Amino acid sequence: MNVQLAVHTFYPESSGGTELYVLQLAKSLARAGHAAHVLAGTPPAGRMVASSDWEGIPVTRLACPADTDNPIRDAYDNATVGEALRALWRDRRPDVLHVCHPGNLSTAILTVAAEMGVPTVVTLTDFWPICPASTLYRSDGALCSGPGDLGRCARCYASMGPRGTRYRSGVQRIPTALLHWAAAACGQVSLARPRAVAWLGALARRTAVVRARLLAADALICLSAFQRQTLARWGYPLAAMRRLPHGTATPAMAVARSVPSREKGLAFGYIGPLSAHKGAHLPIEAFARLRPGRRARLMYWGAIPAPPDEYASRVLQRLEETTNATHRGAFAPGDLPAVMGEIDVLIVPSVWYENTPMVIYEALAHRVPVIATSIGGMRELVTEHHAGWLFARGAVEDLTAVMQARLDDPSSVAAASAAAGPAPEFEAHAREVEALYRRLVEEGRDA
Protein backbone atom coordinates (compact mmCIF):
# COMPACT_ATOMS: atom_id res chain seq x y z
CA MET A 1 0.00 0.00 0.00
CA ASN A 2 0.94 3.61 -0.57
CA VAL A 3 0.31 5.31 2.79
CA GLN A 4 0.44 9.08 3.39
CA LEU A 5 1.11 9.94 7.06
CA ALA A 6 0.11 13.55 7.78
CA VAL A 7 1.44 15.45 10.81
CA HIS A 8 1.54 19.07 11.97
CA THR A 9 5.35 19.20 11.94
CA PHE A 10 8.23 16.75 11.68
CA TYR A 11 11.96 16.21 12.14
CA PRO A 12 14.27 18.09 12.22
CA GLU A 13 12.06 21.13 12.92
CA SER A 14 10.35 19.38 15.82
CA SER A 15 10.94 16.16 17.73
CA GLY A 16 8.03 15.60 20.12
CA GLY A 17 6.10 12.44 20.89
CA THR A 18 3.76 12.76 17.90
CA GLU A 19 6.68 13.15 15.50
CA LEU A 20 8.31 10.06 17.01
CA TYR A 21 5.04 8.14 16.63
CA VAL A 22 4.87 9.04 12.93
CA LEU A 23 8.51 8.09 12.37
CA GLN A 24 8.14 4.74 14.10
CA LEU A 25 4.92 3.95 12.23
CA ALA A 26 6.48 4.91 8.88
CA LYS A 27 9.48 2.66 9.54
CA SER A 28 7.28 -0.22 10.61
CA LEU A 29 5.17 0.11 7.46
CA ALA A 30 8.32 0.26 5.32
CA ARG A 31 9.65 -2.91 6.95
CA ALA A 32 6.34 -4.59 6.07
CA GLY A 33 6.85 -3.67 2.41
CA HIS A 34 4.58 -0.64 2.13
CA ALA A 35 5.44 2.79 0.72
CA ALA A 36 5.11 5.21 3.63
CA HIS A 37 5.39 8.95 2.95
CA VAL A 38 5.16 11.74 5.52
CA LEU A 39 3.21 14.92 4.75
CA ALA A 40 4.25 17.59 7.25
CA GLY A 41 3.31 21.15 7.95
CA THR A 42 6.17 23.59 8.32
CA PRO A 43 6.62 27.20 9.40
CA PRO A 44 5.87 29.61 6.53
CA ALA A 45 9.09 29.86 4.58
CA GLY A 46 10.44 28.98 1.16
CA ARG A 47 8.44 27.03 -1.38
CA MET A 48 4.88 25.88 -0.87
CA VAL A 49 5.95 22.26 -1.40
CA ALA A 50 9.38 20.93 -0.51
CA SER A 51 10.57 17.32 -0.51
CA SER A 52 13.31 15.64 1.52
CA ASP A 53 13.72 12.52 3.59
CA TRP A 54 14.40 11.67 7.21
CA GLU A 55 16.08 8.43 8.23
CA GLY A 56 15.08 6.91 4.91
CA ILE A 57 11.44 8.06 5.04
CA PRO A 58 10.32 10.44 2.23
CA VAL A 59 8.93 13.71 3.59
CA THR A 60 6.87 16.34 1.77
CA ARG A 61 6.52 19.66 3.59
CA LEU A 62 3.74 22.15 2.95
CA ALA A 63 4.30 25.77 3.93
CA CYS A 64 1.59 28.43 3.76
CA PRO A 65 1.89 32.23 3.92
CA ALA A 66 1.51 33.52 7.46
CA ASP A 67 -0.28 36.71 6.41
CA THR A 68 -3.81 35.47 5.61
CA ASP A 69 -7.12 37.27 5.89
CA ASN A 70 -8.27 34.90 8.65
CA PRO A 71 -5.50 33.05 10.53
CA ILE A 72 -7.97 31.53 13.00
CA ARG A 73 -9.99 29.86 10.23
CA ASP A 74 -6.88 28.80 8.32
CA ALA A 75 -5.54 27.03 11.40
CA TYR A 76 -8.32 24.45 11.09
CA ASP A 77 -9.63 24.92 7.51
CA ASN A 78 -6.88 26.03 5.14
CA ALA A 79 -7.94 26.26 1.49
CA THR A 80 -4.37 26.88 0.35
CA VAL A 81 -3.24 23.57 1.85
CA GLY A 82 -6.18 21.85 0.15
CA GLU A 83 -5.18 23.24 -3.25
CA ALA A 84 -1.56 22.16 -2.76
CA LEU A 85 -2.62 18.66 -1.76
CA ARG A 86 -4.86 18.26 -4.81
CA ALA A 87 -1.93 19.18 -7.03
CA LEU A 88 0.38 16.84 -5.15
CA TRP A 89 -1.97 13.88 -5.40
CA ARG A 90 -2.60 14.28 -9.12
CA ASP A 91 0.76 12.56 -9.65
CA ARG A 92 0.73 10.20 -6.66
CA ARG A 93 -2.61 9.46 -5.04
CA PRO A 94 -2.19 7.43 -1.83
CA ASP A 95 -4.18 4.32 -1.00
CA VAL A 96 -4.72 5.61 2.55
CA LEU A 97 -4.35 8.96 4.32
CA HIS A 98 -3.49 8.62 8.02
CA VAL A 99 -3.72 11.97 9.82
CA CYS A 100 -1.63 11.85 12.99
CA HIS A 101 -2.11 15.54 13.81
CA PRO A 102 -4.13 18.04 11.70
CA GLY A 103 -2.36 21.13 13.08
CA ASN A 104 -0.77 23.46 10.46
CA LEU A 105 -2.19 21.31 7.66
CA SER A 106 -5.77 21.72 8.97
CA THR A 107 -8.78 19.54 8.27
CA ALA A 108 -8.65 20.60 4.60
CA ILE A 109 -6.58 17.49 3.91
CA LEU A 110 -9.52 15.33 5.03
CA THR A 111 -11.83 17.22 2.67
CA VAL A 112 -9.47 16.61 -0.26
CA ALA A 113 -9.19 12.91 0.63
CA ALA A 114 -12.98 12.60 0.64
CA GLU A 115 -13.20 14.33 -2.75
CA MET A 116 -10.65 11.96 -4.25
CA GLY A 117 -11.99 8.80 -2.65
CA VAL A 118 -8.96 8.19 -0.42
CA PRO A 119 -9.78 6.23 2.79
CA THR A 120 -8.86 8.18 5.93
CA VAL A 121 -7.65 7.22 9.40
CA VAL A 122 -7.15 9.84 12.12
CA THR A 123 -5.10 9.25 15.26
CA LEU A 124 -6.00 11.83 17.90
CA THR A 125 -2.66 12.39 19.62
CA ASP A 126 -3.77 15.31 21.82
CA PHE A 127 -6.76 17.62 22.34
CA TRP A 128 -6.49 19.67 19.13
CA PRO A 129 -10.09 18.79 18.09
CA ILE A 130 -11.48 20.84 20.99
CA CYS A 131 -8.56 23.16 21.79
CA PRO A 132 -6.61 25.40 19.38
CA ALA A 133 -3.58 25.07 21.68
CA SER A 134 -3.98 21.24 21.72
CA THR A 135 -3.39 21.05 25.49
CA LEU A 136 -6.53 22.23 27.36
CA TYR A 137 -4.01 24.32 29.29
CA ARG A 138 -5.08 27.95 29.50
CA SER A 139 -2.84 30.97 29.05
CA ASP A 140 -3.32 31.80 32.75
CA GLY A 141 -1.97 28.38 33.80
CA ALA A 142 -5.33 26.82 34.66
CA LEU A 143 -6.71 23.61 33.17
CA CYS A 144 -9.59 23.89 30.71
CA SER A 145 -12.54 21.55 30.28
CA GLY A 146 -13.11 22.45 26.62
CA PRO A 147 -14.36 25.17 24.28
CA GLY A 148 -17.44 26.13 26.27
CA ASP A 149 -16.16 29.65 27.03
CA LEU A 150 -15.20 31.33 23.75
CA GLY A 151 -13.88 34.32 25.66
CA ARG A 152 -11.23 32.10 27.28
CA CYS A 153 -10.47 30.56 23.88
CA ALA A 154 -9.89 34.02 22.40
CA ARG A 155 -7.48 34.88 25.21
CA CYS A 156 -5.55 31.66 24.68
CA TYR A 157 -5.42 32.25 20.92
CA ALA A 158 -3.98 35.71 21.53
CA SER A 159 -1.19 34.11 23.59
CA MET A 160 -0.19 31.49 21.01
CA GLY A 161 3.07 32.92 19.72
CA PRO A 162 3.17 34.61 16.29
CA ARG A 163 -0.43 33.70 15.46
CA GLY A 164 -1.75 35.89 18.25
CA THR A 165 0.58 38.83 17.82
CA ARG A 166 -1.67 40.90 15.58
CA TYR A 167 -4.61 40.95 18.00
CA ARG A 168 -2.99 40.27 21.40
CA SER A 169 -3.05 43.83 22.73
CA GLY A 170 -6.71 44.35 21.80
CA VAL A 171 -7.90 41.07 23.30
CA GLN A 172 -6.19 41.74 26.62
CA ARG A 173 -8.20 44.95 27.07
CA ILE A 174 -11.60 43.30 26.56
CA PRO A 175 -13.40 41.53 29.46
CA THR A 176 -13.63 37.76 29.01
CA ALA A 177 -17.43 37.75 29.24
CA LEU A 178 -17.68 40.34 26.47
CA LEU A 179 -15.30 38.31 24.28
CA HIS A 180 -17.48 35.24 24.81
CA TRP A 181 -20.65 37.11 23.85
CA ALA A 182 -19.02 38.68 20.79
CA ALA A 183 -17.60 35.38 19.53
CA ALA A 184 -20.94 33.61 19.98
CA ALA A 185 -22.74 36.38 18.10
CA CYS A 186 -20.16 36.48 15.30
CA GLY A 187 -20.42 32.72 14.91
CA GLN A 188 -23.97 33.15 13.65
CA VAL A 189 -22.90 35.28 10.67
CA SER A 190 -20.37 34.91 7.84
CA LEU A 191 -18.95 38.37 7.34
CA ALA A 192 -15.59 39.13 5.78
CA ARG A 193 -15.48 42.61 7.34
CA PRO A 194 -14.64 43.92 9.77
CA ARG A 195 -11.70 41.59 10.24
CA ALA A 196 -12.25 41.10 13.99
CA VAL A 197 -15.80 39.86 13.29
CA ALA A 198 -14.54 37.29 10.80
CA TRP A 199 -11.87 36.07 13.22
CA LEU A 200 -14.26 35.70 16.14
CA GLY A 201 -16.78 33.99 13.90
CA ALA A 202 -14.14 31.51 12.76
CA LEU A 203 -13.27 30.81 16.39
CA ALA A 204 -16.93 30.20 17.26
CA ARG A 205 -17.37 27.76 14.35
CA ARG A 206 -14.12 25.87 14.92
CA THR A 207 -15.41 23.10 17.21
CA ALA A 208 -18.34 22.15 14.96
CA VAL A 209 -16.35 22.24 11.71
CA VAL A 210 -13.50 20.16 13.10
CA ARG A 211 -15.87 17.64 14.69
CA ALA A 212 -17.83 17.16 11.47
CA ARG A 213 -14.69 16.54 9.42
CA LEU A 214 -13.05 14.21 11.92
CA LEU A 215 -16.22 12.17 12.35
CA ALA A 216 -16.44 11.87 8.55
CA ALA A 217 -13.11 10.00 8.55
CA ASP A 218 -13.28 6.23 8.07
CA ALA A 219 -11.64 5.51 11.44
CA LEU A 220 -10.78 7.50 14.57
CA ILE A 221 -8.09 6.23 16.94
CA CYS A 222 -7.67 7.49 20.52
CA LEU A 223 -4.53 6.75 22.49
CA SER A 224 -6.00 6.92 25.99
CA ALA A 225 -9.33 6.30 27.72
CA PHE A 226 -9.14 9.77 29.26
CA GLN A 227 -8.89 11.39 25.83
CA ARG A 228 -11.77 9.29 24.52
CA GLN A 229 -14.03 10.27 27.43
CA THR A 230 -13.06 13.95 27.16
CA LEU A 231 -13.91 14.11 23.45
CA ALA A 232 -17.17 12.27 24.08
CA ARG A 233 -18.31 15.21 26.20
CA TRP A 234 -17.92 17.44 23.14
CA GLY A 235 -19.95 15.48 20.65
CA TYR A 236 -17.67 12.62 19.61
CA PRO A 237 -19.62 9.36 20.03
CA LEU A 238 -17.74 6.74 22.01
CA ALA A 239 -18.57 4.16 19.36
CA ALA A 240 -16.80 6.27 16.72
CA MET A 241 -13.48 6.28 18.62
CA ARG A 242 -11.32 3.21 19.05
CA ARG A 243 -8.76 3.18 21.84
CA LEU A 244 -5.45 1.82 20.59
CA PRO A 245 -2.39 2.65 22.79
CA HIS A 246 0.81 2.90 20.77
CA GLY A 247 3.37 1.68 23.32
CA THR A 248 7.08 1.79 22.59
CA ALA A 249 9.52 0.31 20.10
CA THR A 250 12.13 -0.21 22.85
CA PRO A 251 12.53 -3.89 23.80
CA ALA A 252 11.40 -4.46 27.38
CA MET A 253 14.04 -5.28 29.99
CA ALA A 254 13.49 -8.72 31.49
CA VAL A 255 15.16 -8.04 34.85
CA ALA A 256 13.84 -5.55 37.40
CA ARG A 257 16.17 -2.98 38.94
CA SER A 258 17.99 -3.71 42.17
CA VAL A 259 17.87 -1.55 45.31
CA PRO A 260 19.92 1.63 44.68
CA SER A 261 23.19 1.61 46.63
CA ARG A 262 23.36 3.92 49.65
CA GLU A 263 26.84 5.07 48.64
CA LYS A 264 25.70 6.34 45.27
CA GLY A 265 22.31 7.55 46.47
CA LEU A 266 18.96 7.62 44.72
CA ALA A 267 18.96 9.24 41.26
CA PHE A 268 15.85 11.17 40.22
CA GLY A 269 15.52 12.22 36.58
CA TYR A 270 13.50 14.59 34.40
CA ILE A 271 13.49 14.18 30.61
CA GLY A 272 11.92 16.88 28.47
CA PRO A 273 11.88 20.56 27.54
CA LEU A 274 12.13 23.38 30.08
CA SER A 275 8.52 24.43 29.53
CA ALA A 276 5.88 25.67 31.95
CA HIS A 277 3.18 23.26 30.73
CA LYS A 278 5.62 20.39 31.33
CA GLY A 279 6.03 21.52 34.95
CA ALA A 280 9.81 21.54 34.55
CA HIS A 281 10.28 23.66 37.67
CA LEU A 282 8.60 21.15 39.98
CA PRO A 283 11.32 18.45 40.29
CA ILE A 284 14.07 20.92 41.27
CA GLU A 285 11.79 22.78 43.70
CA ALA A 286 10.79 19.49 45.37
CA PHE A 287 14.37 18.21 45.37
CA ALA A 288 15.57 21.35 47.15
CA ARG A 289 12.99 20.73 49.91
CA LEU A 290 14.11 17.19 50.76
CA ARG A 291 15.38 16.71 54.30
CA PRO A 292 19.04 17.67 54.91
CA GLY A 293 21.58 14.89 54.64
CA ARG A 294 19.84 13.33 51.69
CA ARG A 295 21.84 10.91 49.58
CA ALA A 296 20.16 11.81 46.32
CA ARG A 297 20.82 13.31 42.91
CA LEU A 298 18.62 15.06 40.38
CA MET A 299 19.45 15.06 36.68
CA TYR A 300 17.65 16.87 33.86
CA TRP A 301 17.97 15.87 30.20
CA GLY A 302 16.61 17.62 27.12
CA ALA A 303 17.26 20.44 24.70
CA ILE A 304 17.79 23.90 26.18
CA PRO A 305 16.31 26.77 24.14
CA ALA A 306 18.90 29.16 22.73
CA PRO A 307 18.68 31.65 24.19
CA PRO A 308 16.67 30.33 27.16
CA ASP A 309 13.39 32.16 27.80
CA GLU A 310 12.53 33.58 31.22
CA TYR A 311 11.00 30.35 32.50
CA ALA A 312 13.86 28.13 31.31
CA SER A 313 16.41 30.57 32.74
CA ARG A 314 14.79 30.35 36.18
CA VAL A 315 14.86 26.54 36.13
CA LEU A 316 18.51 26.48 35.01
CA GLN A 317 19.49 28.96 37.71
CA ARG A 318 17.72 26.88 40.36
CA LEU A 319 19.58 23.79 39.18
CA GLU A 320 22.89 25.61 39.35
CA GLU A 321 22.17 26.80 42.89
CA THR A 322 21.20 23.35 44.20
CA THR A 323 23.76 20.77 45.32
CA ASN A 324 23.68 17.45 43.43
CA ALA A 325 21.36 18.84 40.76
CA THR A 326 22.50 19.15 37.13
CA HIS A 327 21.24 19.61 33.59
CA ARG A 328 22.91 17.14 31.23
CA GLY A 329 21.62 18.74 28.01
CA ALA A 330 20.18 17.13 24.91
CA PHE A 331 20.86 13.54 23.85
CA ALA A 332 20.46 11.49 20.68
CA PRO A 333 17.57 8.99 20.53
CA GLY A 334 20.09 6.16 20.48
CA ASP A 335 21.44 7.32 23.84
CA LEU A 336 18.11 6.87 25.65
CA PRO A 337 19.05 3.47 27.16
CA ALA A 338 22.18 5.03 28.68
CA VAL A 339 20.14 7.94 30.07
CA MET A 340 17.55 5.60 31.58
CA GLY A 341 20.40 3.57 33.01
CA GLU A 342 21.43 6.55 35.16
CA ILE A 343 17.93 7.11 36.56
CA ASP A 344 16.38 5.24 39.49
CA VAL A 345 13.10 7.18 39.42
CA LEU A 346 11.72 9.27 36.52
CA ILE A 347 9.60 12.35 37.31
CA VAL A 348 6.89 13.36 34.81
CA PRO A 349 5.42 16.55 36.37
CA SER A 350 3.34 17.98 33.48
CA VAL A 351 0.57 20.37 34.51
CA TRP A 352 -1.54 19.74 31.38
CA TYR A 353 -3.50 16.64 30.45
CA GLU A 354 -0.70 14.63 28.85
CA ASN A 355 -2.33 12.04 26.62
CA THR A 356 0.08 9.09 26.43
CA PRO A 357 3.57 10.40 27.16
CA MET A 358 6.14 8.42 25.21
CA VAL A 359 8.62 8.95 28.05
CA ILE A 360 6.44 6.90 30.46
CA TYR A 361 6.31 4.04 27.96
CA GLU A 362 10.10 4.25 27.64
CA ALA A 363 10.47 4.18 31.43
CA LEU A 364 8.28 1.07 31.57
CA ALA A 365 10.42 -0.61 28.92
CA HIS A 366 13.57 0.16 30.93
CA ARG A 367 11.92 -0.87 34.25
CA VAL A 368 12.30 2.67 35.66
CA PRO A 369 9.53 3.57 38.15
CA VAL A 370 7.72 6.86 37.54
CA ILE A 371 6.44 9.69 39.73
CA ALA A 372 3.78 11.43 37.62
CA THR A 373 1.07 14.05 37.93
CA SER A 374 -2.28 12.51 38.85
CA ILE A 375 -4.22 13.79 35.81
CA GLY A 376 -4.99 12.75 32.25
CA GLY A 377 -3.11 10.02 30.48
CA MET A 378 -0.29 10.13 33.02
CA ARG A 379 -2.53 8.89 35.80
CA GLU A 380 -3.97 6.28 33.44
CA LEU A 381 -0.58 4.82 32.46
CA VAL A 382 0.87 4.77 35.97
CA THR A 383 -2.27 3.17 37.42
CA GLU A 384 -2.87 0.69 34.60
CA HIS A 385 0.73 -0.52 34.49
CA HIS A 386 1.53 -0.20 38.23
CA ALA A 387 4.37 2.01 37.09
CA GLY A 388 5.05 4.02 40.25
CA TRP A 389 3.46 6.84 42.20
CA LEU A 390 1.23 9.88 41.61
CA PHE A 391 1.17 13.39 43.06
CA ALA A 392 -1.28 16.28 42.90
CA ARG A 393 -0.98 18.63 39.92
CA GLY A 394 1.50 21.44 40.55
CA ALA A 395 1.87 20.57 44.26
CA VAL A 396 5.53 20.89 45.22
CA GLU A 397 4.83 19.71 48.77
CA ASP A 398 3.12 16.56 47.51
CA LEU A 399 5.95 15.77 45.08
CA THR A 400 8.49 16.36 47.86
CA ALA A 401 6.67 13.88 50.09
CA VAL A 402 6.64 11.19 47.39
CA MET A 403 10.35 11.71 46.68
CA GLN A 404 11.23 11.69 50.40
CA ALA A 405 9.34 8.42 50.86
CA ARG A 406 11.50 6.85 48.15
CA LEU A 407 14.64 8.08 49.92
CA ASP A 408 13.44 6.76 53.28
CA ASP A 409 12.74 3.34 51.73
CA PRO A 410 14.93 2.73 48.65
CA SER A 411 13.66 -0.85 48.45
CA SER A 412 10.30 0.58 47.33
CA VAL A 413 11.98 1.64 44.09
CA ALA A 414 13.14 -1.91 43.34
CA ALA A 415 9.70 -3.25 44.29
CA ALA A 416 8.00 -0.81 41.91
CA SER A 417 10.40 -1.81 39.13
CA ALA A 418 9.53 -5.47 39.65
CA ALA A 419 5.78 -4.83 39.84
CA ALA A 420 5.52 -2.60 36.78
CA GLY A 421 3.65 -4.18 33.90
CA PRO A 422 5.32 -4.33 30.49
CA ALA A 423 4.79 -1.47 28.07
CA PRO A 424 2.65 -2.24 25.03
CA GLU A 425 4.77 -3.03 21.98
CA PHE A 426 4.69 -0.51 19.16
CA GLU A 427 5.02 -3.23 16.56
CA ALA A 428 1.74 -4.76 17.72
CA HIS A 429 0.10 -1.33 17.40
CA ALA A 430 1.51 -0.93 13.90
CA ARG A 431 0.17 -4.31 12.81
CA GLU A 432 -3.34 -3.39 14.00
CA VAL A 433 -3.13 -0.08 12.13
CA GLU A 434 -1.91 -1.90 9.01
CA ALA A 435 -4.85 -4.32 9.24
CA LEU A 436 -7.18 -1.32 9.50
CA TYR A 437 -5.65 0.15 6.32
CA ARG A 438 -6.16 -3.11 4.46
CA ARG A 439 -9.81 -3.34 5.49
CA LEU A 440 -10.52 0.24 4.39
CA VAL A 441 -8.74 -0.22 1.05
CA GLU A 442 -10.61 -3.45 0.36
CA GLU A 443 -13.95 -1.86 1.31
CA GLY A 444 -13.18 1.00 -1.06
CA ARG A 445 -12.42 -1.38 -3.89
CA ASP A 446 -15.66 -3.29 -3.26
CA ALA A 447 -17.61 -0.04 -3.28
Image (tube, rainbow, N blue to C red):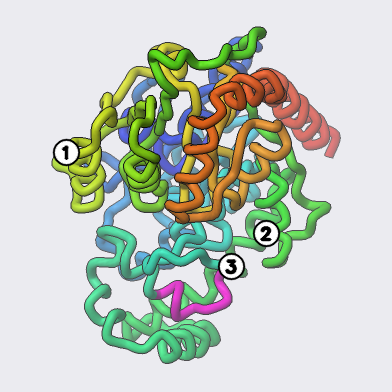
SS for callout 3: loop
Q: Mark 2 and mark 1: span between their CA atoms?
A: 36 Å
Q: Is residue 148 magenta?
A: yes
Q: Is residue 296 left or right of residue 327?
A: right
Q: Is residue 259 left or right of residue 238?
A: left
Residue 363 spot, x, y in % from top left? 55, 25
Mark closer to the chain start, 3 or 2:
3
Tell me, for residue 231, which label it has, or none: 2
Q: Amino acid at mark 1?
A: Ala
Q: Mark 3 and mark 2: span between their CA atoms?
A: 10 Å
Mark closer to the chain start, 2 or 1:
2
Front of the two marks 3 and 2: 3
The quadrant of the picture occupied by the C terminus is: top right
Q: Is residue 248 visible?
A: no
Q: Tell me the residue that label 3 is attached to.
A: 145
- In the image, which residues are magenta? 146-154
Residue 235 spot, x, y in % from top left? 71, 66
Density class for disc 1 (Cα within 10 Å; few <14, some 14-19, many ≥20) is few
The residue nearer to you, when weighing 215 against 85, is 215
Q: Amino acid at mark 2?
A: Leu
SS for callout 1: loop
Q: Tell me the residue that label 1 is attached to.
A: 306
Q: Amino acid at mark 3?
A: Ser
Q: Mark 1 and mark 3: span between their CA atoms?
A: 33 Å
Q: Residue at x 49, y 22 (%)?
A: 344
Q: Is residue 324 left or right of residue 295?
A: left
Residue 246 spot, x, y in % from top left? 65, 30
